[in-house]
Image (cartoon, rainbow, N blue to C red):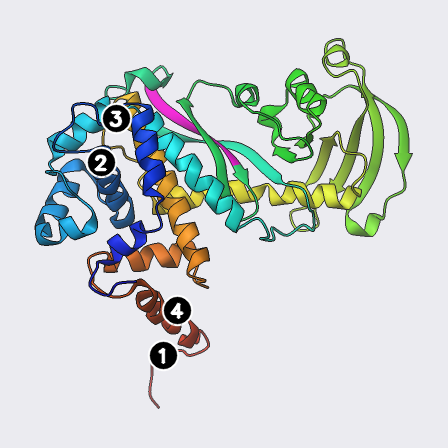
Amino acid sequence: MNAGRTVFAQLMEFLPLPEFRRCVERYHGDYRVQHFTCLDQFLALAFAQLTYRESLRDIEACLRAQSSKLYHMGFRGRLSRNNLAHANEHRDWRIFADFAHLLIAQARTLYREESFGVELAETVYALDSTTIDLCLSLFPWAQFRRHKSAVKLHTLLDLRGSIPANVYVTGGHIADMCMLDQLLPEAGAFYLLDRGYHDFARLYRLAQACAFFVTRARHNTQFDRRSSRPVDRDTGLRCDQTIRLNGPRSALLYPVPLRRIHYLDAETQLDLVFLTNNFLLSALTIAQLYRARWKVELFFRWIKQHLRLKAFYGTTPNAVRIQVWVAISVYVLVAIARKQLRLELSLYKILQVLSLTIFEKSPILQVFADAQADTLTDDPAIQLQLFHL
């Protein structure tokens, strides 16, 4: 890396800019644009994510304070909050969604050998959603309840590396199970679902596509037991059964056998009952797979705490989607940089370092090497003495 370039510019070198330009051309993003291109817009919003800017005015003030460095950071247009607001409102959000998917494909390739706690060769996805509350008067298009608006981020998370394979942005009133209609099931892959996706017709479509699912059973599920397998009760397993649904509707919606596994979690003392269409893996592996589903909950908590997704820079659906996809792009970009630079730091630590060094003109490896050295030499056993005797 060139020591004369800012850390921000060195990080942006990991972006495949030719592919970004193709995404812009696909949706005519720069048609009749002279002063503030889609790349300028992406860089400004990426800067806002990395440095926790609160508003468009905040973004403008911070970047203009470093106006002598903007050209070398990649900016070519005149940055103002009006230009950025207009771009967020009118430019097609699919430009940034398509580009995020390109980054996601690159990141998943880098993390394909990453362990997620279960020894399994197949791809494992966790599908879940998180709700972001909004002001009804500012976001009437996302009305959720009578006096409340909200958007939902439905996320399909690849557990290897915790990389979001896809994100769907909808109003808060959209039921989780409807997102199963948007999936293109991958044959042989596992989909971990909570009870919000408990719809037997949609689950049967997953099974017909040769994909596997693991979900929690509802307490009122009606079934007939066909056979049972022996289990080791010391592991927490209570039963491993082959069943057929016998409810008046469920028997028609899912007409083939299912596997029912009852597991007692020793840590939480919760009785968990799983349904799956996989009859090959051991019952304990199925239980461990569902436990790994909590990675998607940790992902939601992480992005809400460390990226700008609780407050939005625009109030239109287009502006909200652009901000979401740029935030996902920044998250994936940092994951790519972490892997290619062979850093041992967590994503949280990397973001903290970037937020403080974004305008520095030091080699990016040196910046992270200093932070990594501080982490390694920090001994948690060393305590300050409050009193000297």
Residue designated by label 1: 384
Q: Along the polypeptide, which appears first: circle 4 or circle 1? A: 4
Q: Amino acid at mark 2?
A: Gln
Q: Residues within 10 Å of mark 4 (few under 14, many from 20)?
A: some
User: Is residue 128 covered in magenta?
Assistant: no
Q: Along the polypeptide, which appears first: circle 2 or circle 4? A: 2
Q: Amino acid at mark 1?
A: Leu
Q: Secondary structure under badge 1?
A: loop
Spot occupied by residue 37 in the image (x, y as percentages of width and height) = 19, 33
Residue designated by label 2: 41
Q: Secondary structure under badge 3?
A: loop
Instruction: Tell me the residue at 63%/30% (across/down).
Output: 186
Instruction: Tell me the residue at 21%/41% (across/down).
Output: 44
Q: Secondary structure under badge 4?
A: helix
Q: Amino acid at mark 4?
A: Gln
Tell me the mark number nearer the camera, choosing from 1 and 2: 2
- Residue placed most toward the observer, 243 or 45: 45
Spot occupied by residue 65 in the image (x, y as percentages of width and height) = 9, 50
Which residues, given as a range, are shown in magenta?
Answer: 147-156
Q: Along the polypeptide, which appears first: circle 2 or circle 3? A: 3
Residue designated by label 3: 29
Question: Magenta stretch: dominant SS?
Answer: strand
